Image (cartoon, grey):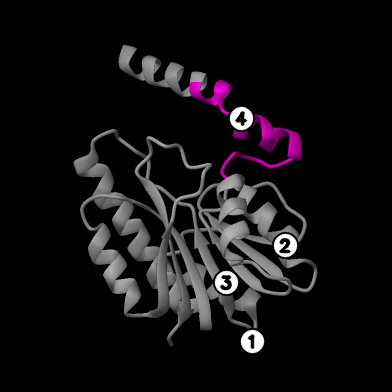
Amino acid sequence: MSSRGGSGGRWRMRQDKDPYVDAAARQGFRSRAVFKLEQIQAKERILKRGMTCVDLGASPGSWSQFAARVVGARGGVLALDLLPMDPIPGVRFIRGDFSKPETVAELRALLGDRQADLVMSDMAPNMSGNRAVDQPRSMALAEEALEFAEQVLGPGGSFLVKLFQGAGFDGFAHSVKGRFGTVRLVKPRASRPQSREIYLLARDYRM
């Protein structure tokens, strides 16, 4: 119990001192994570007006909020999560497991005759604090996100996924390189310096 309380106390102190937490609240975003996507967008321009974007593990919704503002009324954002998410203008939400065929079918029905231009994932597993357990879980989640992306991306589409550096990282990056034209790693400033998280951005999907 004391260990959990100490961890929770450290998390609260870190949040209180985090300028991105305050900035997200001031700007009406649901979490500080929005600034990771904003910084990736500023550098890579992965979101464009009129595009169709799928946000995996979207709740509470800050990435979807930002994406909807960029793609505009002519575009669309489809968000998926096991957890509930409050409505966001311009975003259609599916509550379900993206790795299940029925969830993919529901998403395809919403897409209609379109294909996704971008699949993005800021997902991470529930962390135990044991790297030997957490790293395989995070890589398995990334593999599932990649498998999903291959089902819904159109030719030339892009895939953005959060990874944690460690076992399985290099093998995953290598497998993505065989399916996309270009692959690069991005570390936005809003990612905490001590975190092992990094984002893999793959472009020009080869059907």
**First in residue order: circle 4 vs circle 2:** 4
Separation of residues labelled 4 and 2 (CA atoms): 23 Å
- Marks 4 and 1: which is nearer the front? 4
Our reading of the magenta stretch's main secondary structure is: helix
> Is 2 located above or below residue 125 in the figure?
above
Query: Which of 21 and 103 lies nearest the eye of the viewer?
Result: 21
Circle 1 residue: 113
Circle 4 residue: 19
Separation of residues labelled 2 and 3 (CA atoms): 21 Å
Point out residue 10 in the picture as x, y percentages from the top left corner.
Answer: 43, 19
Residue 70 - label: 2
Q: Is residue 26 left or right of residue 9?
A: right
Circle 3 residue: 107
Q: Which residues are magenta?
A: 14-33
Q: Residues within 10 Å of mark 2 (few under 14, many from 20)?
A: some
Q: Could you tell me which residue is drawn at 42 percent across and 76 percent down?
A: 182
Point out residue 165 in the picture as x, y percentages from the top left corner.
Answer: 29, 50
Tell me if residue 94 can be seen. Answer: no
